Image: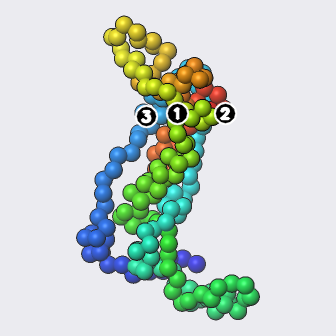
Amino acid sequence: MRIAEYKTRIQCERRCLGNPGFWLPTANIAIIQLCYGFWSFDLDLGGMFLHFPLPKWLHKYFGVRMEEIAQHINKMDGHHKFQAFEAWTRCLMGFGPSPFLAVCFYYHGEEFIIGNPRGSNIALRWDKVVLNCPGSKTVDPCFPWVYKWDNIRKSVAGAIVTFVADGRASGKDSEHA
């Protein structure tokens, strides 16, 4: 099965959807959050766009042709009846707004999973942001210039940084990374 046709018009994508610009972290952000002795893990979100839904109002413009297999599936018991054209409900590769939609959905999910950063049983919890700027009286070269501090663990808090489909988790040990 493959996506055979887009039923949308180029004008609709340009006028109605737009391609908003948005900020993404860089690899330098992941490195900045590391401290000596920290653990770091790689996260790979393969097929990033296919994990996230298209807005419901766009379903009618995108679809998958099912003529070749619909007749065979419709003969099977226990399956819903397929039509010749089924709606495609996931973000698409090559569709202008897909990166923006996928990243928005991802960050909403990440925020939900991490939870309240002040909670006592949260792996990525933190209590305050510390400025460790060069030239200040309290500068400590063992720590990053700016970091989140966890008072319960008495260490720099763990972090997750994601670059669209690739991410880095870091923390003082494997449990908190």
Q: Which residue is label 2 attached to?
A: 175
Q: Nearer the viewer, residue 149 or 52?
A: 149
Q: Residues within 10 Å of mark 2 (few under 14, many from 20)?
A: few
Q: Percent position (x, y) of residue 57? A: 40, 74
Which secondary structure, mark 3? Answer: helix
The label number, if any, that marks residue 56 in the structure image: none
Q: Please name the amino acid that badge 1 sits on.
A: Arg
Q: What is the basis of the colouring in this image?
A: rainbow
- The span from disc 2 to disc 3 (Cα, nearest Å) is 21 Å
Instruction: Say which of marks 1 and 2 sits in front.
Output: 1
Placement of the C terminus among the 4 image quadrants: top right
Placement of the N terminus among the 4 image quadrants: bottom right
Q: Which residue is label 3 attached to?
A: 29
Q: Percent position (x, y) of residue 52? A: 50, 62
Q: Residues within 10 Å of mark 1 (few under 14, many from 20)?
A: few
Q: Percent position (x, y) of residue 103? A: 44, 53
- Quadrant hosting residue 83: bottom right
The label number, if any, that marks residue 118 in the structure image: 1
Which secondary structure, mark 2? Answer: loop
Q: What residue is shown at x 56% (from left), y 47% (from top)?
A: 113
Q: Percent position (x, y) of residue 51? A: 54, 61
Q: Please name the amino acid that badge 3 sits on.
A: Ile
